[in-house]
């Protein structure tokens, strides 16, 4: 037997068991702390992702709203793809250059504003009529005037004049009170002239000559020596040759009979769309013969 005193087994256990228990307890505490820390971090991560997603959606919605109501400068700063997306959202054509898309968006927004303004005026007029009917007879109330820069289409017609003959030089007065003109530096006509001159003149012709009747197919040649043509929704003056694009059907609002100076007429292209005027823009977008399509013919 050695000099070391033997320690009975039953005396060693109380020493080793507390150490093992303490180690296990520390392990459990560490595990719980790690889980709590992990869950807290995960919670923060989920919260951060949710907040970022919400901010991104809000930013996109705000950007979309601003794009739909953007000014000309803001639209010019956008990319072509963004402008096409705005046109699609407004059910507008997406073909053409960047400048065409911007003009199309601005024209659509101004047209909606004009329609809203006219709707409000009609409601005001209806209210005035109701009030007048309930009141005793008195001096009639003055009706609201048309918006600035807008002339009712009925004002452009004149008294019946001389018949229009094939080969005559004529002028078209739009509903806005402006004459159509054909600038040298661009192919599309504009409705912006206040006087009749060489740039506003058109030579009307039909096969066989003679007086122009409502329903006749005619051609219109401007001072540049080129003919008006209708392609899709565009009105242009580009070619010296005459084909289907240059053949236009002229009809009178009054019905059949000869076309005379002062008459209201419509110009219909081969694709069945009628020339229309919106502010200075001259297009052929719809087959309807309405207020935007009315033209007074003059010599």
Image (cartoon, rainbow, N blue to C red):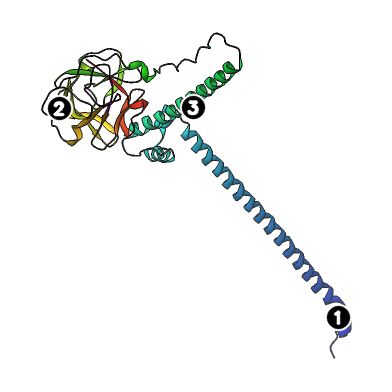
Residue 81 vs 17, above or below: the answer is above
Residue at mark 2? 206
Q: Does the magenta stretch include residue 262?
A: yes
Could you tell me how far apart the alpha carbons at marks 2 and 3 are, in whole angstroms?
41 Å
Secondary structure under tag 3 reads helix
Residue 103 vs 6, above or below: the answer is above
Q: Is 43 or 239 nearer to us in this picture? A: 239
Q: Is 271 or 132 nearer to us in this picture? A: 132
Q: Where is residue 262 in the image (x, y as percent from the top left)?
A: 27, 16
Residue at image point 37% right, 29% down:
103
Residue at mark 1? 12
Residue at mark 3? 116
Quarter of the view holding residue 165: top left
Residue at the far front: name it: 137
The range drawn in magenta is 252-266
Could you tell me how far apart the alpha carbons at marks 3 and 1 are, in whole angstroms?
97 Å
Q: Position of residue 181 (x, y in %)?
A: 25, 20
Secondary structure under tag 2 reads loop
Residue at image point 19% right, 19% down:
164
Q: Where is residue 136 in the image (x, y as percent from the top left)?
A: 60, 12
């Amino acid at each position: 037997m050695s000099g070391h005193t033997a320690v009975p087994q039953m005396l060693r256990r109380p020493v080793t068991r507390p150490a093992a228990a303490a180690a296990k307890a520390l392990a459990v505490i560490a595990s719980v702390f790690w889980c709590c820390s992990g869950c807290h971090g995960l919670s923060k991560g989920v919260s951060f992702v949710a907040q970022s997603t919400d901010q991104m959606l809000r930013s996109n919605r705000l950007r979309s709203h601003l794009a739909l109501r953007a000014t000309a400068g803001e639209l010019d700063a956008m990319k072509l793809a963004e402008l096409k997306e705005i046109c699609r959202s407004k059910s507008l054509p997406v073909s053409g250059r960047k400048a065409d898309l911007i003009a199309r968006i601005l024209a659509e927004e101004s047209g909606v504003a004009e329609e809203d303004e006219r709707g409000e005026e009609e409601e005001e007029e209806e209210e005035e009529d109701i009030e007048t009917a309930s009141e005793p007879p008195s001096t009639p109330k003055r009706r609201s005037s048309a918006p600035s820069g807008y002339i009712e289409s009925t004002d452009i017609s004149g008294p019946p004049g001389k018949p229009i003959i094939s080969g005559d030089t004529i002028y078209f007065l739009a509903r806005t009170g402006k004459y159509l003109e054909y600038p040298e530096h661009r192919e599309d006509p504009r409705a912006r002239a206040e006087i009749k001159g060489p740039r506003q003149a058109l030579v009307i012709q039909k096969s066989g000559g003679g007086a122009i009747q409502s329903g006749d197919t005619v051609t219109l040649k401007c001072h540049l020596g080129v003919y008006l043509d209708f392609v899709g929704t565009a009105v242009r003056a580009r070619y010296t040759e005459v084909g289907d694009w240059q053949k236009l059907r002229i009809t009178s609002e009054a019905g059949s009979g000869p076309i005379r100076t002062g008459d209201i007429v419509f110009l219909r292209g081969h694709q069945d769309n009628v020339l229309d005027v919106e502010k200075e823009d001259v297009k052929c977008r719809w087959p309807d013969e309405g207020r935007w399509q009315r033209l007074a013919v003059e010599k």
